[in-house]
């Protein structure tokens, strides 16, 4: 009778131990799941914040460039009377003299690096340009040129502007200023006649410096593409000017699918073997910032800790069961 009671007690003890271990195992798995979700959310929020920070910098420069160009357009349209100049072409120089201080003061008021008016000399003969660019804190009046005679009439900032009313160019090197730029320009009219292109620039080096130093989680570069899916910035310089969907087809398919419903988002693109995100942010001119960070480092410690706890629990469970059966066999 005493021996039977002892066996029952041992059996009950074993059941309690096994039940306790399973409870610990269940709690561990629940904590792992909860911690995983918190870490995943935290990574997404950090990625969104970092990308939004860079987007705000570029967005501010985009809006400033567009607003300045709009002001230059208004000045030209209000100060250059095409009907009078058509009757007396010699008046253009008089109007340009009055135009120069207005253009310069407007550029300075926006604290911009450039601002310009390029007249269509097929419409207004010998009209030339009014263009300023900065060197340090000094603004320099650019040397006169004729857009047609000096072979600039095939440039995107001219052709696309006259054809579409406005344009953002791809990065290009402007020899007179000895720098690489992205231009925004609009068509200026007088009496419904397109008489000039006006515009301002983003200096490419400013974009390059900002995005080159910004990496999501220190491992993922930020890429900038335009509305035509052309890469404007990539740390891999050989990719600049290429089609994004051809260079990064997987990222492109994810972004285009998501972008149809949201202008910005952080998407979990993790697989069984890798933790990763894809973040994008569309700007007001339809450029898109994209980054695809690897987040393995954030989950490695969680996974190792959970795995170690599970191994310890299973090992202890195996040990307890082994002792019980060993005693059972001996008895």
Image (cartoon, rainbow, N blue to C red):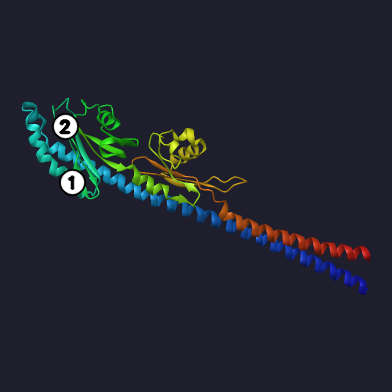
Q: Relative to 108, does residue 73 appear above or below in the rendering?
A: above
Q: Relative to 90, does residue 134 appear above or below in the rendering?
A: below
User: 269 or 230: which is nearer to us?
Assistant: 230
Q: How many marks?
A: 2
User: 239 or 62: which is nearer to us?
Assistant: 239
Sequence-wise, the earlier of marks 1 and 2 is: 1
Which residue position holds label 1? 106
Q: Residue at x 44, y 33 (%)?
A: 243
Q: Relative to 89, does residue 3 appear above or below in the rendering?
A: below
The image quadrant where one finds the C terminus is bottom right
The Cα–Cα distance between marks 1 and 2, rounded to whole angstroms, is 20 Å
Res. 195 image quadrant? top left
Q: Position of residue 295 (x, y in %)?
A: 54, 51
Q: Residue at x 33, y 40 (%)?
A: 285
The image quadrant where one finds the N terminus is bottom right
How dense is the environment of label 1, judged by Cα within 10 Å: few (below 14), some, or many (20 and up)?
some
How dense is the environment of label 2, judged by Cα within 10 Å: few (below 14), some, or many (20 and up)?
many
Q: Relative to 287, does residue 295 appear above or below in the rendering?
A: below
Which residue position holds label 2? 128
- Residue 163 placement, left or right of 212: left
The dot on residue 146 is none
Q: Position of residue 233 (x, y in %)?
A: 40, 41
Q: Position of residue 8 (x, y in %)?
A: 86, 69
- Can you tell which of label 1 and label 2 is closer to the viewer? 2
Res. 303 image quadrant? bottom right
């Amino acid at each position: 009778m005493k021996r039977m009671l002892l066996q029952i007690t041992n059996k009950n003890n074993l059941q309690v131990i096994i039940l306790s271990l399973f409870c610990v195992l269940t709690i561990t798995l629940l904590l792992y799941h909860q911690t995983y979700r918190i870490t995943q959310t935290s990574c997404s929020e950090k990625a969104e914040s970092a990308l939004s920070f860079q987007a705000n910098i570029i967005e501010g420069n985009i809006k400033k460039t567009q607003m300045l160009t709009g002001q230059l357009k208004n000045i030209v349209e209000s100060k250059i009377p095409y009907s009078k100049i058509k009757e007396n072409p010699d008046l253009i120089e008089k109007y340009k003299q009055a135009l120069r201080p207005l253009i310069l003061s407007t550029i300075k008021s926006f604290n911009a690096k450039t601002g310009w008016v390029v007249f269509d000399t097929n419409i207004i003969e010998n009209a030339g340009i009014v263009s300023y660019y900065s060197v340090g804190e000094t603004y320099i009046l650019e040397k006169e040129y004729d857009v047609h005679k000096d072979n600039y009439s095939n440039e995107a900032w001219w052709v696309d502007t006259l054809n579409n009313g406005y344009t953002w160019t791809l990065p290009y090197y402007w020899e007179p200023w000895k720098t690489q730029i992205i231009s925004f320009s609009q068509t200026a009219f007088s009496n419904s006649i397109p008489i000039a292109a006006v515009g301002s620039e983003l200096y490419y080096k400013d974009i390059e410096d900002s995005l080159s130093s910004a990496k999501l989680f220190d491992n993922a570069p930020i890429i900038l593409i335009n509305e035509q899916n052309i890469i404007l910035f990539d740390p891999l310089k050989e990719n600049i000017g290429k089609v994004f969907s051809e260079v990064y087809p997987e990222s492109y398919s994810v972004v285009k699918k998501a972008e149809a419903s949201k202008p910005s988002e952080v998407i979990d693109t993790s697989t069984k073997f890798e933790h990763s995100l894809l973040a994008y942010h569309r700007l007001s001119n339809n450029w898109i910032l994209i980054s695809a960070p690897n987040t393995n480092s954030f989950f490695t410690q969680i996974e190792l800790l959970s795995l170690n706890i599970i191994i310890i629990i299973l090992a202890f469970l195996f040990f307890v069961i082994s002792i019980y059966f060993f005693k059972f066999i001996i008895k």
